[in-house]
Image: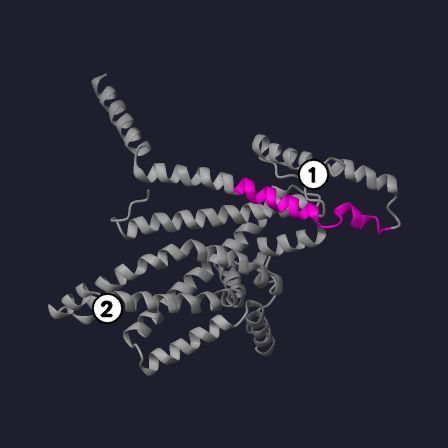
Amino acid sequence: MTSTRITWESSWDWLIRLVTSETFIYVVKRILQALLTLFLASALSFFIMKLSPGDYVDTLRQNPKISPERIEELKRQFGLDKSWVEQFWLWLWRILTKGDFGTSFVYQRSVSSLLWERIPATLVLAIASLIMTWAIAIPLGIVAAVKQNRATDRILQVISYTGQGFPSFITVLFLLVFAQVSSPLFPVGGMTSIDHADLSWFGKIIDIGWHMILPTIALSITSFAGLQRITRGELLDVLRQDYIQTARAKGLPENRVIYVHALRNAINPLITLLGFELAGLLGGAFIAEQFFNWPGLGRLTLQAVIAKDQYLVMASLVMSAVLLNVGNLLADLLLKVADPRIRLE
């Protein structure tokens, strides 16, 4: 009995420490802020859609085979006969009470099921691009800083400026031309091959990875160029600090000075950019997914906007806002881990 009481008291103390910890309070605050952001984003996107002329049912009027009576029936079925405010609050109430984002006008399916099908494809592409960007940009930024004003630094700066100066759609077009010239080396269109279902589990991974090469490069080029310049600038600022000169005067190896002392302090601003970088990749995915026929959230949202499929558009934008908030929260928590001196409050 005494042992059980001690265990219960220990668990209770642990729970109190968790709830009152700085990290827990910060995460709760950010979640509450995110809920307000999601509400405002969904309301803004809904009323902007409504301000545009016409709706999904209006496109059906052009079909002479659909009678006016059927048009009115569809308006009642989709709730388009109600006022804007009623439509929005009914949609919001269904989400809060049932977790139901509504039914897609075009696909005649639950919006939630459509999103769960597309979100993994977009996340895989964005995360792969993020890893590729950081794995290339940070080492090159370090090299450029260490070789400041030398030939290597100048070449890398030219590459960086060129990469940032190219719009995403131009990069995608160049990659499509390259894919056509090198055909069938790089597949274009879709996420998998025709015989994907017949492959082994390892073969399926290789197949998806092979289809990801060109879209990942298209997403990474602009991000890589900017991140390389930021890494170079931050590292140069740190290398001019007095404590770096002191470390060198003590006879520490140059690699230790750069990678242990300098880079550790220069990495903080880069971690801060991580959340914005993820959001930028999700935005850029619209272009890459459309050109490469990648079955992701960006392409689905674009098709929904064109068709005025309002519940699908709103749910897609809400999911994008959720991913943005999650990315920024992870960046802040990683910053706390990387530098314990930082207080989250």
- Of helix, strand and loop, which one carries label 1? helix
Going by the numbered disc 2, the residue's amino acid type is Arg
In the picture of the structure, the residue carrying the numbered disc 1 is 84
Q: Position of residue 326 (x, y in %)?
A: 45, 47
Q: What is the distance, in whole Å, between disc 1 and disc 2 at their CAs?
A: 59 Å
Q: Position of residue 49 (x, y in %)?
A: 67, 48
Above/below status of 311 relative to 285: above
Left or right of residue 340, residue 28 in this image = right
Going by the numbered disc 1, the residue's amino acid type is Trp
Which labelled disc corresponds to residue 240? Answer: 2
Q: Position of residue 184 (x, y in %)?
A: 59, 74
Name the residue furthest left.
250
- Of helix, strand and loop, which one carries label 2? loop
Residue at the image point whose x is 71% and y is 43% from the top:
108
* Near-viewer residue (64 or 250): 250
Residue at the image point whose x is 54% and y is 60% from the top:
284
Q: Position of residue 262 (x, y in %)?
A: 24, 64
Q: Is residue 78 among the parts visible in the rendering? A: yes
**Quadrant, the N terminus:** top left
Left or right of residue 38, residue 9 in this image = left
